[in-house]
Structure formats: structure tokens, C-alpha cells
Image (cartoon, grey):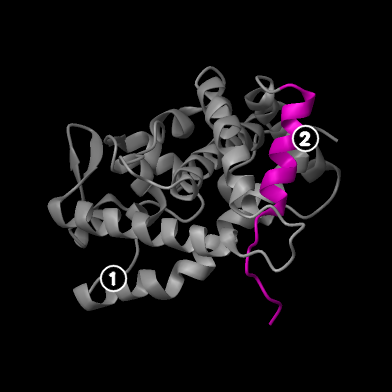
Amino acid sequence: MSYAAVIRPVIDRIHVSLRHAARPEVRGLYTPRGLVPGVEIDAFYALLDHPIPDAALAARMVYVGFDPEAVATQGLVELADGAWQLTGQGREVAVEAARILGRTAERLWSYRPSPSLPGLAAVEAALPLVGRALEAGQATGGPVFRAYTPVWEPDGATASARLVARLEALRHHRADAHRAAWGAAGLTVDEIQALEPGPEREAIEAETNRRDEPLYDVLDADERLVLLASLGALNDGLLAP
């Protein structure tokens, strides 16, 4: 099994757990303003740094559909010269959303119910390795990864907040690889979403891993182990229903 395949669910677990834990605060950010989270909640680490080309945002939204007029309706993002950018209100909301996710990460990851768990030391170990992987990804990433990097890391941000931003970007490298894999197999977005487990699905996942793997070539064997162990040790706060 490739390293890309092994680390994928670890990164996805972190993403899901943080978004889940932060959801009440995020709702409290949007609801009083009469808003609901839209494309900006997925892209704000990039949008706070630079505009995103229209084609890249459409590619990112391919699984749920992309309606530019609907995207602009809430007034948080606007299309200008072929790229999406935050409005004044959008930037205000995005900055606060980033703060919420950073605080949530710090709270979850600093919790050490056992002294054997590394807590925030795992964040410090993972942060530079993820940063190097992101830099390497500029040579291998697809259009969404390139459009969603670099990410916004404000002065004074905690290591936890910076790691959240970098991991969010890292996920787009694999997402590009997956879109390229099912596209090369001649499938449409509806067909890949309907595809059941089996040889065809396995072939697409293997091709996705092959395309995603170069991201980690910059890390040696020991560094790969450190990254996997550090991310895997981060508390997620998830509980079965």
C-alpha cells in the first residue's frame, strides 16, 4: 500500500473532526448575519490570501454543482476579472471562521488524557513536514491545489492554526488526483459517484494514490513515519452516536 493511501484517512479524520467540533461556533457566526455557510467556508484559507480562478472553484465544486449566481447571492464572495474574491463582509466572516477552527484545533489537540500522548508536541513535529510537502506539491498538484495555495497564515497564529490551514490545502492535492483519475478512466461525475466497490473502483483509487504519492517524495522514510504518527496522535473528539 502506498504512503498516500495510508495517510489519506488520517488527514480526512482530522478534517472531519475539526469541522464537526467547530460547527456550533460556525453556525453562531453565520446565523445572526442571516447567512448559511457556502463555498467560502471551504476556500477561506486560500481566499484570505488571494483570489481563486473561476474554473478552479468550479472544479472543486464539481460533486455538488456550481451555480455562480447562487454563490454570489449571500454577498460573501464576488467574481471579478475571472476570479473569486472575498467581499468586505466575506473577509470579516472568513477571518473569524479561521479563528474558530484554530481555537478548536488547539483545544482538541492539547487534550492529553494519558501522559503517553504527545499533545501539541505532535503539532510542532508535523507542521514543518506538511509545509515541505505543500511546497513539493507545486510541481505535481492539479489546478485546484495550485489555486488553493498558498494559504493564509496571519502573524501570531498558533502552530495548531497553521497546521489546520496547511492540512486543508494538502487535501486538495489528492482531490485533484482523484478527479484526474476518474476523468482519465472516461467517467462522468455522476458515474464516479454511483460507482460501487469493485475492480473498477479499486483501479481508480490506485491511480489516485499514484498521482498523489509524489507529494510525499520530499520526505524520507523517517520523516514519513513522524508525520503519520504525529497526525495520528492528534485527538479528534469524535464519539460514536
Q: Secondary structure at mark 1?
A: helix
Discs 1/2, front: 2
The answer to if 152 sits in the magenta stretch is no
- The kind of residue on which mark 2 rests is Leu
Left or right of residue 136: residue 24: left
> Looking at this view, is 21 or 35 the one in front?
21
Q: Which residue is mark 2?
A: 225
Residue pictured at 68% horizontal, 52% vertical: 118
Residue pictured at 47% horizontal, 63% vertical: 104
Determine crowd level at label 2: few under 14, some 14-19, many 20+ residues with C-alpha closer than 10 A: few
State the image quarter where residue 3 is shown. top right
Range shown magenta:
220-241
Viewer can see residue 204: no
Q: Secondary structure at mark 2?
A: helix
Relative to 144, is 32 above or below? below
> Looking at this view, is 62 or 47 the one in front?
47
> Looking at this view, is 233 or 16 the one in front?
233
Q: Residue reaching furthest front?
A: 115
Q: Which mark is residue 30?
A: 1
- The kind of residue on which mark 1 rests is Tyr
The Cα–Cα distance between marks 1 and 2, rounded to whole angstroms, is 39 Å
> Looking at this view, is 137 or 178 the one in front?
137
Relative to 113, is 124 above or below? above
Residue 63: x, y in percent?
51, 52
Left or right of residue 239: residue 86: left
Residue pictured at 47% horizontal, 56% vertical: 64
